[in-house]
Image (cartoon, rainbow, N blue to C red):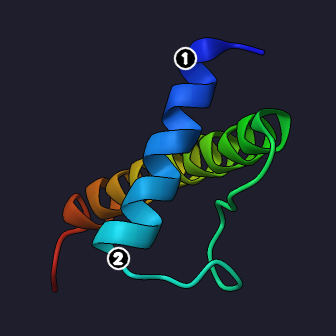
Amino acid sequence: LNPVRLAIAIRGYWIQSRVSHIPDRFGVFLSGPPRRKVSEGNLVNFTMTFMAMHNAVIGCLFWLASLAWSFIPFL
C-alpha cells in the first residue's frame, strides 16, 4: 500500500463525512480496510484527472472555433 494514497483516501473520507456531511451510503469514500480506501482514492484520482483532461480538450476546441469565427468578415 502506498502511504501517500492512503493519506489522500483518509483525508477524502474526512472531508466527505465531516465537512460535506454526506452519508456513507451516498459517498465515494467508505470507512473500511486500508486497501479498499486506497482503491477508492485511485478511482477518484482517475476520475478527476480524466475530467480535467476532457475539459482542457473541449476548451481548446471551443477556443479554436472562436478564432475561426473571429476571422470571418461581416457583410
Number of dots carrying numbers: 2
Residue lying at 61% horizontally and 40% vertically, measured from the top left: 45
Tag 1: amino acid? Val
Displayed quadrant of residue 74: bottom left
Q: Is residue 8 above or below residue 64?
A: above
How far across and down, in percent of the image, does residue 6 sit?
Answer: 62, 28
- Element carrying mark 2: loop
Of marks 2 and 1, which one's residue comes earlier in the chain? 1
Report whether 60 appears left or right of 34: left
- Left or right side of 27 for 35: right
Q: Position of residue 9 (x, y in %)?
A: 58, 41
Which quarter of the rendering shows the N terminus?
top right
Which residue is under mark 1? Answer: 4
Residue 20's disc is 2
Amino acid residing under circle 2: Ser
- Farthest-out residue, left: 74
Q: Percent position (x, y) of residue 60?
A: 42, 47
Residue situated in front as seen by the camera: 43 or 29:
29
Identify the residue at image location x=33%, y=54%: 63
The answer to whether residue 19 is above or below residue 36 is below
Secondary element under disc 1, as helix, strand or loop, is helix
